[in-house]
Amino acid sequence: MSLVQSVDNVALLPAYLAAGTAVLVLLADLLVARTAATVAVAAVGSAFTALGAAVVGAGGERHTFCVGADCSWVLDGRAALVAAVFALLTLGVLGLSGPLLRAGRAPQGEYCFLLACAMTGGVVLGAAGDLITLIVALETLTLPLYVLVGLRRGSLASAEAAVTFFVVSVVATTLTLLGAALLYAVTGGLHLGRLGVTLTERPELLDVPLTTVAVALVVLGLAFKVAAVPFHAWAPATYDGAPLPVAAYLSTASKLGGVVALLAVVQRALPAGVTGPVLALLAVLTMTVGNLVALRQRRTVRLLAWSSVAQAGYILAPLGALALAAGRTADARAGAYAAAVAYVIFFVVLELAAFAAVVALRPADADGGTLDDLRGAARRHPWVGGTFALALIGLAGLPPGLAGLFAKVTVVRSLLDGGAGWLAVVVALNAVVGLAYYLRLAATLYAAPAPTATPVEARAAVVGSRPAWLVSLVLAAATAVAVVVGFAPQLVLDLAR
């Protein structure tokens, strides 16, 4: 067998565009040193990355860095979708970051460069064909976020959030790497497809304790990235301490990256009989703990963070059907994988819209504030409040938020097809619990303002009276996409398969 790897530069085009964007941002900041120019370069690069991914993905599946039948880069329709979503999320967060950068609370060159680097990791992640590429891509996505979280000047909470995120993430990465090393020791391979074939053709390896430990370490290490219970403690403090646009990126892009990585190893490499029970348990714990704790939150970003934890449980739920024999048939597995990908796409669109509304309603240099700070916000800013309420209703899974409704229906249907009716009941019960805090926040937006406003509330009302046009544009675009996918959910499902 030849050990010479073939290289398909067309398949690598999205990664080239993403990495080139990061380099051009550095040059623009060095040579021009103007916020508008630096942000414009990052935005144009993100748009071209999304376009490049769509064009290459439309041409069919492409492989590169191959040795024999094993390839380290596999760009298919799903990988192209993931790359395009990462690029568009980066573009959206750049729009949300305009007021923050103009206020001088973060250095614009470093900020845009780190966002472009994180986008590069996300683009590579979707096409990763082996564990090393997968882990390196995931860390390329995550490492810039450590710095972005702590980039708000003069904020102790931001620094504490960055340290918390960094320490816990390093431990999770160590677990994943240790699991990958043990898998290599057992199977002699690291390519995802090769691992799956080896463990299928040699079932006696599943009886080796080292295999079970390796699989558990990989799954648990990746569970951190999606903030699954009990690896969720970093999320609320990190989201609340980070600048609002960075919190939006954490809640969307970081979640998407974790799901893509977890799905890659579960679908192609690890035995479903081992991962299924673990994922079912994680799904139940995550959605239940996230919803129950979210009921008690009084700070806006912490409520969105805990709801994001609960949403991670819904995303993992279809994979929990693999615990049963009925969930491991070809059709049931395909439905479970498609449901997980579709749900996370629906979620990131609605979550971005929710955070965009919070950014629009808060001062440029402020955090998310409390729920009381948003009381009556929809009366002062009707269209911003209306889109925020629509995003919350969508996350709750109620009409007219059709995207969220179809997302939950897709998850429940995949569970029923996989014979996991009990898990479908848990999802339904948790969705009912989630209604309480989503509808409470939506009602707060339309509640009558308090008779006496504190100075902070008064300042928020004045500064937030004219949302920046870029923030308004991102909010409008995210809401429009949510409406479109709500009326045409099959488009997302077809791309997710």
Image (cartoon, rainbow, N blue to C red):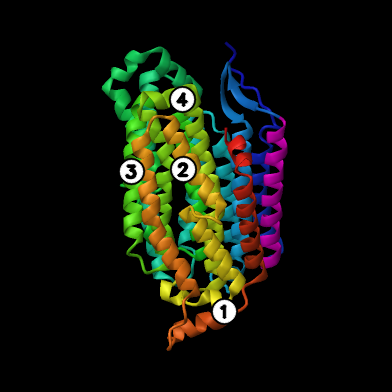
In magenta, the rendered stretch is 35-59
Taking the image as shown, residue 179 lies to the left or right of residue 118, namely left
CA separation in Å, label 1 and label 4: 56 Å
Discs 4, 3 touching: Cβ within 8 Å:
no
Figure check: 250 above or below 51: below
Q: Quadrant of residue 491?
A: top right
Q: Is residue 141 one of those drawn in magenta? A: no
**Residue at left 32%, top 56%?**
292
Residue toward you, 3 or 449: 449
Figure check: 377 above or below 454: above
Residue 459 lies, in percent from the top left, at 51, 83
- For marks 1 and 4, give the one nearer the viewer: 1
Q: Quadrant of residue 52?
A: top right
Q: Residues within 10 Å of mark 2 (few under 14, many from 20)?
A: many
Q: Amino acid at mark 1?
A: Arg
Residue 143 lies, in percent from the top left, at 48, 49
